Amino acid sequence: MFEQREGEIPLACDPAADADDARLAYIGRVTSPWKLREDCPKNMNDARERGGGATVTVDAAYRAGLAGLAGFSHVIVLSWFEQAPRNLIVQKPRHASDAKGVFALRSPARPNPIGLHVAAIVSLDMENGVIELDAIDALDGTPVIDLKPYFASVDAIPDATRPTKDA
């Protein structure tokens, strides 16, 4: 699914094969319009521009954890990109002229393929565990590993910077 490109460097071992790998609990799943990797938006801005909305359905055992989320305008969804390779440490994105370390990229291919999505909450059905979102940049069926409320007062950093080349 992920072809190795010139300049990329794989890890010596695959973290997915490590017996000491983290034991995560999937708390729910994403429902999105994106069925194929090549159709999936590359970021949340692209997902919003393309429209379609999305939902997160929280499994029954975890629905009590939604208490208090009502009233928040946005939620941080942490997902597990289960289809992504975990053995690349340096990657060459299609849009970039140079290869970069995985920790300088938002690619799903990484030792721990955790997705980070900040989405607007359109509606919240606590009883059924359904959070309707404005958008998401994740494939349909992607497992959700955590939800966190978004606090603009601490999560937004107005003077944050990033490199301008290939950013």
Image (tube, grey):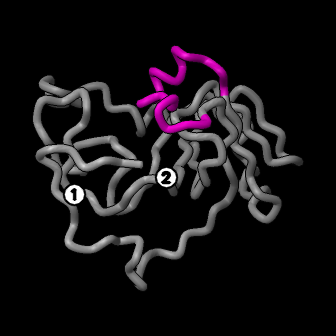
Check residue 50 for magenta coloring. Answer: yes
Q: Which residue is drawn at 11% across and 46% down?
A: 7
Quadrant occupied by the C terminus: top left
Q: Which residue is drawn at 86% across and 47% down?
A: 128
The secondary element bearing badge 2 is classed as: loop
Compared across the picture, whether 84 is left or right of 71 comes to left
Mark 2 belongs to which amino acid? Phe
Q: Which residue is drawn at 14% across and 42% down?
A: 99
Of residues 95 and 72, the one nearer the viewer is 95
In the picture shown, does residue 141 fall above or below 27? above
Compared across the picture, whether 60 is left or right of 106 comes to right
The secondary element bearing badge 1 is classed as: strand
How many C-alpha atoms fall within 10 Å of the one at disc 2: few (<14), some, or many (≥20)?
A: many
N-terminal label among 2 and 1: 2
Mark 1 belongs to which amino acid? Ile
Q: Residue at the far bottom: name it.
A: 19
**Which quarter of the picture shows residue 64?**
bottom right
Disc number for residue 77: none
Instruction: Report the number of numbered marks.
Output: 2
First to last magenta residue range: 35-53
How many C-alpha atoms fall within 10 Å of the one at disc 1: few (<14), some, or many (≥20)?
A: some
Residue 50: percent from the left, percent from the top? 55, 16
In the picture shown, does residue 110 fall above or below 71? below
Q: Residue at x 46, y 21 (%)?
A: 46
Residue 59: percent from the left, percent from the top? 77, 58
Check residue 95 for magenta coloring. Answer: no
Disc number for residue 89: 1
Question: Which residue is label 2 attached to?
Answer: 81
Compared across the picture, whether 65 is left or right of 117 comes to right
